[in-house]
Image (tube, rainbow, N blue to C red):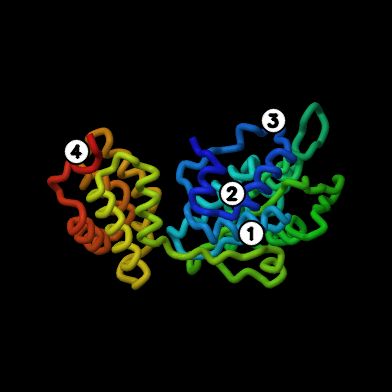
């Protein structure tokens, strides 16, 4: 079970912030209608400075923009923050078909009447949710116009033909963006000015070691060191342009370690979780060679977990 206060105290997060966070949860109720949207994160986020910056901004009613390369924990941080604040989560992924209707809602017939079927931004405003704008730098102009109104300090969205939408006091929005992905573009200044921006640092060896120990308390020390080293090796190769970021997948690494509990050979598990994320033959060979230097083909479940 994810214990919020204990998790933050363990990282020496400022005690005043922890207390303010507790008061926020007490002061802002959640409707039973959306209580199932409060989701316990599958991976805890570790990073004292990042957590303090994010929590401070959100407590003051600001919206966040998380920028950075792949595998820096942007989506993990989003999940953790929503859960820490005790808010229902609405995930909005931007792509070529995401327009204003997909965000606010569309007209539909109900009981022989035309009514608005509320979109995720509208529901977020109604229920005081945390809206996660994933890959916000892929948003097209029609969607960006909605974002300008949604993120404005007046906290009012004017929908033509309907009443104004007033954002609940607990409503917040967090945008994420990766650099250099196909279909992305620069965010305009007006949109960026509506966010507090956190540039997510690359995952460090100490952080990953700590994370693996928390996720898998019974992992062998040597196995933990090798998995950490493998991920660091892959991260270095990706940042140097030797491989793409496709095999650099933290969730894939965690999933691979979980499958080893069933008795699957570690070399096969890592192949499924990391190596096969690349569909380029030559890149897979590079990743395979990197894996072989860290994960012997002779390893079994007993080499990974303590008995």
The residue that mark 3 highlights is 33
Above or below 236: residue 265: above
Q: How crowded is mark 4: few (under 14 residues within 10 Å), some or many (20 or more)?
A: few
Q: Residue 302 carries which label?
A: 4
The residue shown at (70%, 44%) is 24
Question: What is the secondary structure assignment of the residue under circle 4?
Answer: helix
- Alpha carbon of mark 4 to alpha carbon of mark 1: how far? 43 Å
Quadrant containing the C terminus in the rendered view = top left
Q: Which residue is drawn at 54% across and 66% down?
A: 199
Q: Tag 3 or tag 2, which sits nearer the N-term?
A: 3
User: Are the residues tagged 2 and 4 within 8 Å (C-beta)?
Assistant: no
Q: Which of the marked residues, 3 or 4, is nearer the chain's N terminus?
A: 3
Dot placed on the residue nearer the N-terminal end, 2 or 1:
1
Q: Of residues 92 and 83, which is closer to you in this image? A: 83
Regarding residue 234, the answer to whether it shows in the image is yes
Question: Which residue lies under the disc numbered 1?
Answer: 64
| Of pointers 1 and 3, the one earlier in the residue sequence | 3
Nearer to us in this view, 89 or 135: 89
Q: Label 3 to label 4, Cα distance in Å?
A: 45 Å
Q: Which badge, 2 or 4, is on the more N-terminal residue?
A: 2
Mark 2 touches mark 1? (CB < 8 Å): yes
Mark 1 surroundings within 10 Å by alpha-carbon count, few (fewer than 14), some (14 through 19), many (20 or more):
many
Tally the numbered discs: 4
Q: What element carries label 2?
A: helix
Instruction: Tell me if label 3 and label 4 are in contact, CB under 8 Å.
Output: no
Disc 2 from disc 1: Cα separation: 11 Å
Nearer the observer: mark 4 or 1; the answer is 4
Question: Looking at the picture, how far across and down is residue 109, in whole percent?
Answer: 77, 33
* Residue 49 image position (x, y, % from top left): 54, 61
**Is the residue marked by circle 3 packed among few (<14), some (14-19), or many (20+) residues within 10 Å?**
few
């Amino acid at each position: 079970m994810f214990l919020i206060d204990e998790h933050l105290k363990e990282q020496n997060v400022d005690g005043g912030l922890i207390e303010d966070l507790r008061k926020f949860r007490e002061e802002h109720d959640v409707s039973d209608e959306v209580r199932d949207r409060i989701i316990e994160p599958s991976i805890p986020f570790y990073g004292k400075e990042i957590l303090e910056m994010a929590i401070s901004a959100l407590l003051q009613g600001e919206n966040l923009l998380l920028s950075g390369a792949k595998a820096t924990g942007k989506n993990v941080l989003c999940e953790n923050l929503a859960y820490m604040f005790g808010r229902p989560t609405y995930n909005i992924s931007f792509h070529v078909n995401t327009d204003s209707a997909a965000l606010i809602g569309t007209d539909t017939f109900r009981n022989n009447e035309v009514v608005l079927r509320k979109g995720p931004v509208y529901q977020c405003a109604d229920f005081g949710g945390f809206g996660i704008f994933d890959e916000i730098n892929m948003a097209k102009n029609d969607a960006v116009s909605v974002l300008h109104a949604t993120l404005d300090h007046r906290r009012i969205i004017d929908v033509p033909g309907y009443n104004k939408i007033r954002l609940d006091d607990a409503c917040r929005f967090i945008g994420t963006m990766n650099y250099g992905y196909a279909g992305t573009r620069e965010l305009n200044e007006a949109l960026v000015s509506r966010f507090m921006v956190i540039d997510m640092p690359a995952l460090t060896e100490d952080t990953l070691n700590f994370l693996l120990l928390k996720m898998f308390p019974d992992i062998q020390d040597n196995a933990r060191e090798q998995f950490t080293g493998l991920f660091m090796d892959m991260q270095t190769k990706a940042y140097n342009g030797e491989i793409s970021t496709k095999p650099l997948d933290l969730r894939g690494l965690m999933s691979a370690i979980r499958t080893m509990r069933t008795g699957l050979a570690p070399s096969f598990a890592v192949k499924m979780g990391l190596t096969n994320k690349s569909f380029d033959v030559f890149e897979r060979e590079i990743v395979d060679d990197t894996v072989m230097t860290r994960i012997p083909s002779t390893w079994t479940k007993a080499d990974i977990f303590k008995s």
